[in-house]
Image (cartoon, grey):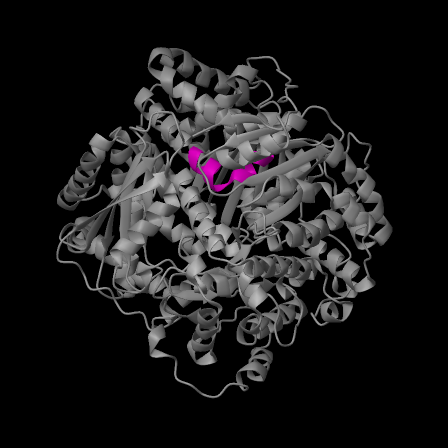
């Protein structure tokens, strides 16, 4: 990890983060990073750029693999080829591309296109505008990721100088976590660090604190909005404070974190609730307290605001904070927040993100500012001190001075207003074209010929494979290092009151995890799209005896959280999909009775009577979907293709895709007139789903806690209705299999193509996992990302449905990317794979299959396998097939994949200009659907 300062928004830190992983002194191939992705058991392998530091983290549960990763990364960071290789700078940063002197000039570059995608998303534009306005005098006032309008001003000389200045051991922090030998760590580091002369860290890498403003500031920015539609209620407003003129002590930080949770952490939190109930906006923006930089910030606002209501939002925020400072928080709210935060700290559940890296990021956030790196990891003492203060002085005495000092009486306040501009995206494109036309007009014929030659030379380099000798330089494991058997999750299948119960005896540090699974195949087709809102209503509406605030606080005081959501998947070999609603909860072993009592209360006692709250759910869901369309276009395209190819995909897309967004837009218009009907429909879903027959319970904990929980599970099941009050409604719907372009205001595209290879006669083999991973890490990486300039290109094989899909992410191309997809079969047929490369591909696949999981995830994965009929015997067979994959399997898969080329469907999420150009080039290729 290196700290560094930047004085402009050319994105050097970000481009360098990418570039140092493109070959080094010891590993002189194009991208050692990709070779590690292909053939490592890593549990994490990536890098990230912050406003004042760049982190290069790796993780693996295999010690030999871990040291391989460490060595490659150390060599990359300290001795990269990119500082001598202009073409790497062009590829990862930016360059002019010209295929033929007669054609138009264009900008290309991975980071350039990544940041064009970032600058197409309103929430990202708002976040950047807020940060830069809060910190006008230091490095946080520019964009370390790079502004697409500024990136092309960066020179190769500046790029090299930046590495020389900041990538020195004296300016680095190196962090290890694990049970490996510390002496071996130091030996590896010594081999690298001893090569450098001692040098003091450059003074420029010390971030200067931003002085606090004497007066509040107001900023107005525009963001790209869609043409047509009502833009009057599409404004965004966010109020931001810089909380101090320097770092804070740990107890104050903890108190601020606690206050943040009290204000915004749950649907019942007063600032969040009052803003949403005001009807002034659709959804919350701003991240609350942010403390990853030198000085902490606090941000809060709304999007989906009418222009006339901008000032009202700001006034409501200030008045609510004043009221909370005056009146304080309820005892129940404080107790709920305290339990939630303490549960989270003790559980330390980082999901699929390795715990060691999570601790590293916490530690580094203080260490780079010359503070104690272990202080942020020791929460027990300050937490106990805070609890004692609250018990002794009362919560008002603790939190009111904090609200007053750091927020209400703090003049370093920036209000950022974002205005929708339907012409911004096309105007930005036109400006870029004009710049490129001027550049080209100033070039001589010789210049143009030279640029066309350089473009071809760069593409040739990008598409030429590394030599076998270079590839062999990257250290890798052998098949002997790989466990021959899949990871086993202890599972005992029992029964309680006639209901199947799965028990997973795993050490969980006294936490009990539970999932209660209900069949939703009795829900009528016309009610499917209400299911996500139904799930939210269960958690965020009240009962006859408790309003939703009391219910939420009770969940916070007694449990580690409860969630409810639908699960939909194809089942291999079956026409009908698996459709379930999962109720998931966790609690300390002493609170399991409370957990199941609360689950029962939520499922059976919540009343669907509060129209105003339901309106909020619809507005929030619509705002979330609009953000998803802009920021995760590849996910939207994948869901849409799935909906055209299988029933499970259709159901899922109805609840989370473009169809769902259309449903929400329509629902919003008819809520007032149709509330009784909608409320009755929610009740009908409940009666169709929550019953004992066909229910399944999954429990993960230590054996004694599993046994102790049985009586509470039994009581919970006894209280459920015995069987459904409605008949089953099997669904066999799919969307028409036509090529579709979903048009949004964006500067980048998301391109998808998919087909069902089971329908083409393919029989599943574990080799498909190896082949699809290899396609993504070679053919698609090289052609879609490296030479195509997209931020990402990958493929996915859903072994349950048989759908094989290609996708790109933040892609400057459209039809060119589809040509790459269609060339995959030829790539496989012409493939010449040596034993080392094949072994790497197999090992990398096993790394994915054996992904590191915390105990709750192991129990949940076992549940999913049970629901989808995947046995341990089948898992062993697939593993054997993976380990015995041969080159002939790749060649044979080429014929299978041809079906996607010939019969696949295409869905893109793209700009209107690129869709129009594609439909001109290939007449009527896309059905066009405008959203946003």
The answer to whether residue 518 shows anywhere in this view is: no
Q: Residue at x 33, y 46 (%)?
A: 126
Q: Nearer the viewer, residue 3 or 151?
A: 151
Q: Percent from the top left, x then y, of residue 386?
A: 26, 58
Residue 627 belongs to the span the image colors magenta: yes
Main secondary structure of the magenta stretch = helix
Q: Residue furthest front?
A: 445
Q: Percent from the top left, x then y, of residue 377?
A: 40, 65
Q: Residue furthest right?
A: 888
Q: Residue at x 45, y 18 (%)?
A: 682
Q: Is residue 220 left or right of residue 104?
A: left
Residue 126 belongs to the span the image colors magenta: no
Q: Is 221 located above or below residue 538 in the figure?
A: below
Q: Which residues are magenta?
A: 626-638
Q: Is 89 located above or below residue 519 in the figure?
A: below
Q: Is residue 432 left or right of residue 735?
A: left
């Amino acid at each position: 990890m290196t700290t560094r300062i930047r004085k402009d928004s050319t994105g050097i830190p970000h481009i360098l983060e990418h570039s140092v992983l493109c070959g080094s002194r010891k590993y002189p191939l194009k991208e050692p990073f990709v070779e590690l992705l292909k053939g490592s058991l890593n549990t994490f392998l990536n890098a990230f750029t912050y406003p004042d530091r760049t982190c290069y983290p790796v993780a693996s549960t295999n010690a030999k693999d871990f040291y391989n990763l460490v060595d490659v990364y150390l060599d990359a960071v300290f001795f990269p080829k990119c500082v001598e290789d202009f073409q790497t700078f062009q590829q990862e940063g930016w360059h002019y591309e010209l295929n033929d002197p007669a054609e138009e000039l264009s900008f290309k570059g991975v980071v350039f296109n990544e940041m064009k995608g970032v600058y197409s998303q309103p929430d990202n534009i708002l976040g950047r505008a807020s940060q830069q306005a809060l910190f006008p005098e230091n490095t946080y006032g520019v964009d370390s990721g790079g502004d697409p309008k500024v990136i092309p001003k960066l020179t190769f000389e500046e790029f090299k100088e930046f590495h020389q200045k900041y990538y020195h051991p004296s300016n680095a922090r190196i962090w290890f976590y694990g049970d490996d030998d510390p002496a071996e760590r130091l030996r590896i580091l010594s081999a690298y660090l001893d090569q450098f002369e001692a040098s003091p860290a450059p003074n420029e890498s010390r971030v200067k604190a931003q002085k606090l403003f004497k007066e509040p500031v107001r900023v107005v920015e525009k963001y790209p909005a869609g043409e047509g539609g009502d833009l009057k209620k599409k404004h965004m407003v966010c109020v931001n404070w810089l909380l101090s003129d320097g770092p804070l002590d740990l107890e104050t930080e903890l108190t601020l974190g606690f206050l943040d949770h009290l204000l915004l952490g749950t649907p019942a939190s007063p600032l969040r609730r009052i803003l949403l109930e005001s009807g002034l906006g659709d959804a919350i923006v701003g991240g609350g307290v942010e403390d990853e930089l030198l000085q902490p910030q606090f941000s809060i606002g709304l999007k989906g605001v009418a222009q006339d209501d901008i000032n009202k939002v700001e006034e409501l925020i200030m008045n609510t904070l004043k009221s909370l400072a005056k009146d304080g928080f309820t005892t129940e709210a404080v107790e709920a927040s305290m339990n939630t935060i303490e549960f989270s700290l003790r559980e330390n559940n980082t999901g699929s993100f390795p715990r060691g890296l999570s601790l590293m990021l916490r530690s580094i956030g203080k260490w780079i500012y010359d503070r104690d790196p272990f202080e942020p990891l020791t929460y027990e003492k300050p937490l106990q001190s805070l609890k004692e203060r609250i018990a002794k002085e009362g919560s008002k005495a603790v939190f009111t001075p904090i609200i007053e000092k750091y927020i209400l009486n703090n003049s370093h306040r920036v209000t950022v207003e974002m205005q929708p501009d339907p012409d911004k995206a096309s105007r930005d494109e036109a400006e870029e074209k004009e710049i490129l036309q001027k550049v080209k007009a100033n070039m001589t014929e010789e210049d143009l010929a030279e640029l066309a030659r350089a473009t071809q030379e760069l593409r040739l380099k990008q598409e030429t494979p590394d030599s076998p000798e270079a590839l062999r330089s990257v250290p890798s494991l052998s098949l002997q290092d790989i466990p021959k058997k899949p990871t086993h999750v202890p599972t005992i299948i029992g029964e309680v009151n006639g209901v199947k119960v799965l028990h997973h005896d795993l050490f969980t540090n006294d936490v009990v995890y539970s999932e209660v699974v209900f069949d939703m195949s009795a829900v009528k087709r016309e009610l499917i799209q209400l299911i996500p809102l139904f799930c939210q209503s269960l958690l965020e509406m009240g009962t006859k005896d408790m309003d939703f605030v009391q219910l939420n606080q009770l969940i916070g005081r007694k449990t580690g959280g409860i969630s409810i959501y639908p699960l939909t998947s194809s089942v291999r070999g079956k026409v009908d999909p698996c459709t379930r609603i999962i109720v998931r909860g966790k609690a300390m072993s002493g609170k399991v009775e409370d957990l199941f009592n609360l689950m029962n209360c939520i499922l059976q006692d919540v009343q669907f009577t509060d129209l105003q709250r339901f309106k909020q759910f619809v507005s929030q869901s619509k705002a979330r979907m609009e953000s998803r369309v802009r920021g995760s276009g590849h996910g939207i395209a994948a869901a849409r293709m799935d909906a055209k190819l299988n029933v499970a995909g259709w159901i899922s897309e109805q609840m989370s895709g473009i169809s769902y967004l259309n449903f929400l837009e329509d629902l919003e218009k008819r809520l007032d007139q149709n509330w009784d009907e909608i409320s009755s429909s929610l009740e009908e879903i409940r009666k169709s789903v929550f019953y004992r027959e066909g229910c399944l319970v999954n429990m993960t904990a230590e054996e004694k806690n599993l046994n102790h929980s049985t009586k509470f599970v039994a009581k919970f099941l006894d209280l459920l209705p015995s069987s459904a009050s409605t008949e089953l409604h099997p669904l066999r719907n799919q969307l028409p299999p036509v090529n579709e372009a979903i048009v949004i205001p964006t500067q980048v595209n998301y391109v998808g193509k998919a087909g069902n290879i089971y329908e083409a006669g393919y029989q599943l083999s574990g080799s498909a996992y190896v082949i699809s991973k290899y396609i993504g890490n070679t053919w698609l990486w090289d052609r879609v990302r490296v030479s195509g300039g997209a931020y990402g290109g990958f493929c996915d094989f859903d072994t349950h449905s048989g759908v094989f899909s290609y996708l790109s992410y933040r892609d400057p191309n459209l039809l060119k990317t589809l040509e790459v997809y269609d060339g995959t079969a030829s790539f496989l047929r012409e493939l010449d794979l040596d034993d080392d490369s094949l072994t790497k591909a197999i090992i990398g696949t096993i790394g994915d299959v054996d992904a590191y999981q915390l105990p709750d995830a192991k129990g949940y994965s076992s549940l999913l396998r049970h629901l989808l009929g995947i046995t341990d015997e089948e898992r062993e067979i697939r593993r054997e097939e993976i380990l015995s994959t041969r080159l002939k399997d790749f060649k044979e898969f080429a014929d299978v994949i041809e079906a996607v080329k010939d019969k696949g469907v295409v869905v893109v999420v793209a700009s209107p200009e690129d869709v129009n150009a594609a439909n001109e080039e290939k007449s009527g290729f896309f059905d066009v659907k405008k959203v946003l």
